[in-house]
Amino acid sequence: MIALPKELIASLTNIKGFNKEAFEQVHASGEQVTSIRLNPVKSRAPLPINQSTGQLVHQSAIPWCPYGYYLSQRPSFTFDPLFHAGTYYVQEASSMFLWEVLAQAIGNNTAGVKVLDLCAAPGGKSTLLASYFNDGLVVANEVIRSRAAVLAENITKWGSANTVVTNNDPKDFVELKGYFDVMIVDAPCSGSGLFRRDEDAIDEWSEENVVLCSQRQQRILADVYSTLKNDGLLVYSTCSYSKAEDEDILDWICATFSVESLVLHVKEEWGIIEVESDIHKAKGYRFYPYKLKGEGFFIAAFRKRDGETQDYRVQGLQKISKEEAIAAESFIKSGEMIFCSQAEKIIALPATYKTDVAILQKHLYLRQAGITVGALKGRDLVPEHALAMSTLVAENIPRIPLTKQQAIHYLQKKDIEPGNFDKGWALATYENVNLGWMKILHNRVNNYYPVEWRILKESIAG
Ligand code: SAM
């Protein structure tokens, strides 16, 4: 029997939707819910299959996210090439409710929308945002450097050119007054919502930490609030059940800023509980695992009703040379991308966002922007993995379909048998989805899968 913190249970007693017996029972049950969200730009690929039976894992749709699916069991994601190819993201179902929040607050007006995901690693919400705002600009920020690396990996695999990854403290955004249309603060929290799937979180939980988290949440919001435009959308979420990190933060937001709380429509059958903050009656939405198929989660949305904007004067991005342009164009579908240079690599960006990326580059540490195409070696381009993960690769670049076994070997960075192929760069593919680059030489194939992302295990068992 899992021992849940008594102080937590006591603090939740009078909160709407809380049921002590059901709460304890759902934690004791050991039930695990597995869910994934498909990548719409790569979703021609099938859903995961059970590695031992070869059967498609039965799935059902998550009602608040059109690309979300529950899986009937947890397959070995490590041994599914489609997982590494970014065709889906393994994401907890309650958090996918962000999609519904956006659908209700923004609708289809996504073109040109600038979005900040402030606390972004490992990238669950950012990849959702990149799909939702496929013609907007998403800035995925993470303050902790090692976590920003994981975020960059997941964004790279997702393959969208409209995403920028930054590694900054919330304070660093102060120069970007009134810049963003949408801001997501998925705040660091005491984590009680994840107790069912991560028992270690129970040992780490304490009342003191709830207080510290609540103070930090206020500090983070205070640091970035001016970055949001007047009329912009602020979404605040946590995976904590504690009122001090949820409803009380909504009251703090209302007392500190000029905002309007948004009422969201939730269908009764979804099992989501609408709550209100004590003083300002701001609406929040609670997810309890005994009421729906998902973990503990809290989300609220506000419309900003004040704020200044600022004019930005920036120098353009660093141009690429003629040789670089010729080499890059030979790998890329012609379209609305522009090229620039960063740290001697060629970057492709949607033309509409070239000034924005220059603005962001002036004020923030850009870990990655758009799609890194590659770098010139002599007169030849050595393409980057990010290009293979994108949808930009020119049609005339050869694609080499691999079997499941070959795909796993490729992802383990093992040698691939040379087939009867033309020499030069080619994409390794599996089920029509790109896995990465190979270079076909006279008598061997060089495997260019990134060494740091390779599958380390030999087999599912080992
Ligand atoms: N949004 C992510 C997702 O959906 O995958 C999960 C974010 S997690 C709940 C909170 C993140 O905030 C963590 O990655 C953590 O490193 C980051 N963080 C921690 N302290 C922070 C701070 N002082 N300011 C901003 N972010 C912070």
Image (cartoon, grey):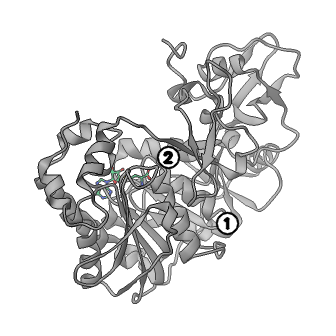
Q: Quadrant of the N terminus?
A: top left
* Picture residue at 50% right of the left edge, 75% below the top: 265
Q: Could you say where residue 390 lies in the image, as x and y percent from the top left?
A: 69, 46
Q: Could you say where residue 7 lies in the image, as x and y percent from the top left?
A: 12, 52
- Tell me the element at label 1: loop
* Picture residue at 53% right of the left edge, 13% below the top: 458
- Categorize mark 2 by other alpha carbons within 10 Å: few (<14), some (14-19), many (20+): many
Q: Nearer the viewer, mark 2 or mark 1?
A: 2
Of marks 2 and 1, which one's residue comes earlier in the chain?
2
Say left or right for 120 vs 51: left
In which quadrant of the rendered view does residue 166 lie? bottom left
Residue type at the position of mark 2:
Gln
- Vertical placement of residue 233 versus 360, above or below: below
Q: CA distance from mark 2 to mark 1?
A: 23 Å
In which quadrant of the rendered view does residue 132 lie? bottom right
- Categorize mark 1 by other alpha carbons within 10 Å: few (<14), some (14-19), many (20+): some
Q: Is residue 178 visible?
A: no
Residue type at the position of mark 1:
Asp
Q: Could you say where residue 297 lies in the image, as x and y percent from the top left?
A: 37, 57
Residue under numbered circle 2: 91
Q: Could you say where residue 66 lies in the image, as x and y percent from the top left?
A: 63, 57
In which quadrant of the rendered view does residue 446 lie? top right
Asked if ligand 1 lies within 8 A of label 2, the reply is yes
Residue under numbered circle 1: 135
* Picture residue at 88% right of the left edge, 15% below the top: 420
